[in-house]
Amino acid sequence: MTGIQFITDEAGRRTAAVIDLKKHRALWEDIEDVLMSRSRRHEKRIPLAKVKADLIKGGKLRG
């Protein structure tokens, strides 16, 4: 795949990647999404019904 270079250690194992963001912006955005999701997996959840009710109350969603 063009636009991606891998950095390897002494044993030839890939340890890092350099991504050309002009060519692969969508790929980087997907990676960011996964990292953000993983960082928030232990946060307290809010039920969907409460989110909808709050949006309706705030005038950002019609009920």
Image (cartoon, rainbow, N blue to C red):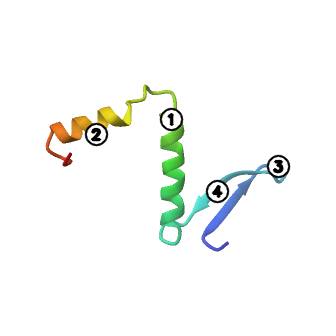
Secondary structure state at the residue bearing disc 4: strand
Specify few, some or many for label 4: CA neighbours under 10 Å numbering under 14, 14-19, or 20 or more: few
Q: In front: mark 4 or mark 2? A: 2
The residue positioned 50% from the left and 41% from the top of the image is: 37
Which quarter of the figure has residue 52?
A: top left
In three-dimensional space, the C-alpha distance between marks 4 and 3, rounded to whole angstroms, equals 15 Å
The residue at which mark 3 appears reads as 10
Residue 8 x/y as whole percent: 75, 53
Give the spatial CA distance, label 4 vs label 2.
40 Å
Residue where numbered disc 1 is placed = 39
**In screen coordinates, is 24 left or right of 48?**
right
- Identified by mark 3, the residue type is Glu
**Which of the two labelled residues, at mark 4 and mark 3, occupies the earlier sequence position?**
3
Q: Position of residue 57 (x, y in %)?
A: 16, 37
**Residues under numbered marks 2 and 1 in contact, where contact means CB atoms less than 8 Å apart:** no
* Residue at the disc numbered 4: 17
Three-letter code for the amino acid on which mark 4 is drawn = Ala
What is the three-letter code of the residue carrying label 2?
Lys
Q: Is residue 18 above or below residue 32?
A: below
Q: Which label sits on residue 52?
A: 2
Q: Tags 4 and 3 in contact by the CB under 8 Å rule?
A: no
Q: Nearer the viewer, mark 4 or mark 3?
A: 4
Above or below for 19 versus 45: below
Question: Which of the marked residues, 4 or 2, is nearer the chain's N terminus?
Answer: 4
Nearer the observer: mark 2 or 3; the answer is: 2
Q: Position of residue 10 (x, y in %)?
A: 82, 49
Q: Residue furthest front?
A: 63
Image quarter where the N terminus lies is bottom right
Q: Are marks 2 and 3 in contact (CB under 8 Å)?
A: no
